[in-house]
Amino acid sequence: MKGAVAWFAENHVAANLLMLFLLLAGFVTAFSIKLEVFPETTLDRITITTAPSNH
């Protein structure tokens, strides 16, 4: 890991290009991500009906 950090510290252009790429990728992802306010869900339900008892 120290080798990569040292290499980027010496190569400012590469570090800036990597930063620019990451920022652009983040903006593209942020604007193309699908956002659902109310997602579609299916609820499994069972309805039980009973007759009233005559006591």
Image (cartoon, rainbow, N blue to C red):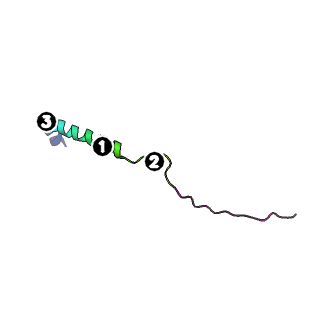
Question: SS for tag 1?
Answer: helix
Q: Where residue 36 appears, x then y in whole percent?
A: 45, 48
Q: CA distance from mark 1 to mark 3?
A: 22 Å
Q: Reading the chain from its start, which is encountered first: label 1 or label 3?
A: 3
Q: Amino acid at mark 1?
A: Val
The residue at which mark 2 appears reads as 36
Task: Name the outermost residue toward the right.
Answer: 55
Q: CA distance from mark 2 to mark 1?
A: 18 Å
> Is residue 46 rendered to the left or right of residue 49?
left
Q: Are marks 3 and 2 in contact (CB under 8 Å)?
A: no
Q: Reading the chain from its start, which is encountered first: label 2 or label 1?
A: 1
Q: Amino acid at mark 3?
A: Val
For the record, the magenta segment spans: 41-51
Q: Amino acid at mark 2?
A: Glu
The residue at which mark 3 appears reads as 13
Q: Quadrant of residue 25?
A: top left
The residue at which mark 1 appears reads as 28
Question: SS for tag 2?
Answer: loop
The C terminus - image quarter? bottom right
Question: SS for tag 3?
Answer: helix
Residue at the spot x=18%, y=38% of the render?
Answer: 17
Residue at the spot x=32%, y=45% of the render?
Answer: 29
Q: Reading the chain from its start, which is encountered first: label 3 or label 2?
A: 3
Q: Where residue 10 appears, x then y in whole percent?
A: 11, 35
